Image: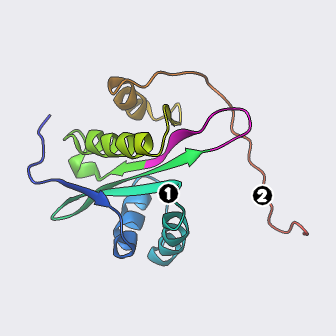
Amino acid sequence: MIKIQNLIIREAQEFDAELIANLSTQLGYPSTSSDMLVRFTKLNSNALNGIFIAEHDTLIGWIHVSVIESLESDPFAEIRGLVVDASHRGSGVGTQLVTAAEEWSYKKGCTRIRVRTSMVRVESIKFYEKLGYLSKKIQNVLDKSLTGHSA
């Protein structure tokens, strides 16, 4: 692994939305800059969300982590998304972003952090296992469109 010199991990700002959208598209989640800005602004205004970027001359990665609150368990953190530019994968960028998310989560009072990844993303699973994450269960994701649903 070749580490990147002068890598900066910082909280994301509104002006990062276009590059965040570009990286999301690279991973298979197409997004326009304007759509990303709307989502970013909403999430960033909620203290239960942390969004960090990795910068080396330009934005080369991002991570979104949230505090999840529910009736059935104490709050925990969940990595909601992590993307590293294809040309920088394997250089330690993802590890540094995960470390930032873990530190943020701990400061928010979380004693546990979770990440969900598709079974087809074998490299992602290996990446998280290398960082100490353990597979707890396999589950189905059921989705229903509410388009056209009357309120």
Q: Which residue is mark 1?
A: 29
Instruction: State the scheme by which the image is colored.
Output: rainbow
Residue numbers of the magenta segment: 69-81
Which residue is pictured at 10% across the width and 54% down the height? 6
Q: Is residue 95 left or right of residue 122?
A: left
Which residue is pictured at 31% across the width and 58% down the height? 53
Quadrant in which the C terminus is drawn: bottom right
Q: Residue 24: x, y in percent?
A: 43, 58
Name the residue type under label 2: Ser
Quadrant in which the N terminus is drawn: top left
Tell me: residue 14, above or below residue 99.
below
Q: Residues within 10 Å of mark 1 (few under 14, many from 20)?
A: few
Q: Is residue 76 magenta?
A: yes
Say which mark, if any, is on residue 108: none
Number of numbered labels in the structure image: 2
Which residue is pictured at 41% across the width and 44% down the height? 107
Q: Residue 40: x, y in percent?
A: 48, 68
> In which quarter of the view is residue 71 placed?
top right
Name the residue type under label 1: Tyr
Disc 2, SS = loop
* Mark 2 vs 1: CB contact within 8 A: no
Say which mark, if any, is on residue 145: 2
Disc 1, SS = loop
Residue projecting furthest to the left:
5
Q: CA distance from mark 2 to mark 1?
A: 18 Å
Q: Residue 106: x, y in percent?
A: 42, 39
> Considering depth in this image, is 58 or 31 the residue closer to the camera?
58
Marks 2 and 1, the one that precedes in the sequence:
1
Q: Residues within 10 Å of mark 2 (few under 14, many from 20)?
A: few
Which residue is pictured at 37% across the width and 59% down the height? 23
Q: Is residue 70 magenta?
A: yes
Q: Residue 74: x, y in percent?
A: 62, 34
